[in-house]
Amino acid sequence: MNRRQAPSGPLQALADALTAEYAAVFAYGPIGVRLTDAARTAARRAESAHRARRDALVLQLSAAGNPVPADKAGYALPFPVTDAAGALRLAVEVEERTAAFWRAALPHTTGADRNRALAALTDCAVRATRWRHTAGVTPVTVAFPGRPG
Amino acid sequence: MVLTCPVARGRTTPHDRTPGHSRRNLLRAGALLTLGGATAPLTGCDLFDRADEPDPAPDPLEPLAAEARELAGRHRAALATDPDLAGLLTPIAEAHEAHAGELAKLLGRSTSPATPSAGASADGGDRAATLAALRKAERGGRESAAKLCAVAPPERAALVGSIAAARATHVEALK
């Protein structure tokens, strides 16, 4: 099983989304400590939203007797987070990257799974927009959330 | 119309030059009408056949593409009445135009018609009302795209899903 390619089926797509959620939860740790006030609260809320998706995926995969990818002790961040600006930049990137995994799950899912993947993609895209707004990045939206490139 | 013309009764010779219509002329006219009647349906069939071809299977992406153009038109109209909103609305209008372009590609059209409607813009200079109307339109657009995503074939699900998510981010940006 090759993890780094486009998902080969629904199980792989959901397993890939789970690894993205693990990494997002991890990243919000260093993000949260660099933020204050409303931004820190928003980071906490985002982190708990990613935890909820993670837990739902673990449950869904294991309930069906499928292999559940394990969480890691740490994930490599794309750049070191040393201040609030870096934390906001990372938050935008985390949401964009996670959105891409959920978008990739759409073609491999149907019914309730498809709807859950779309809800997750949408939530990530909306949070990315909020973080861009907080960071003063314009425009705050992208034309095709989750689309690579 | 022929039936309302006066008929010269009792005058059946072709040499007759008096006003009115001889029986022979009437018969001739009738023959022409019959010919016309016979050819008209043929032409009609051709027209209907051609019109029928795209009709039987209207692509479910058509309404989504139309909605993208309509949403772009709303933002462009709002921009025209309140140019100070350019920073906020231009990228959103461009996103809708990009969506319409991608959908047109999937629909096998090389270009998508330019955004028409303006009507929706709540003018009168009330910016809050304008933005509220745009938010409402985006919310409706997100819902219809999400519904379509749920039933879209795999090769279309990602694009339609991105469009639904984009419209949700527009609602957020317009707050």
Image (tube, rainbow, N blue to C red):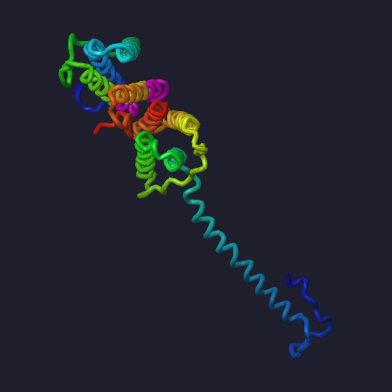
Q: Measuring 28% from the left and 25% from the top, which residue is drawn there?
A: A96
- Where is B44 relative to A111, above or below? below
Asked whether, in this view, residue B59 is left or right of residue B21, the answer is left
Quadrant for the N terminus of chain A in the image: top left
Q: Is residue B90 above or below residue B34?
A: above
Residue bounds of the magenta highlight: A103-119
Closer-to-camera residue (B45/A119): A119
Residue at point 35%, 31% (across, down): B162
Along the viewing direction, whichever of A53 and B9 lies nearer the viewer: A53
- Front residue of A56/A149: it is A149
Total labels: the figure holds: 0
Residue plotted at (30% across, 12% down)? A40
Q: Position of residue A137 (x, y in %)?
A: 28, 28
Decide if residue A23 is in sight here: yes
Q: Is residue B129 left or right of residue B164?
A: right
Image-quadrant location for residue A50: top left
Q: Is residue B77 above or below residue B31?
A: above
Q: Position of residue B145 (x, y in %)?
A: 43, 32
Give the image location of residue A135, x and y in percent.
28, 23
Residue B53 in picture, x, y percent from top left: 48, 51
Magenta region includes residue A111: yes
**Quadrant location of the C terminus of chain A?**
top left
Q: Is residue B122 magenta?
A: no
Determine the main secondary structure of the stretch shown in magenta: helix
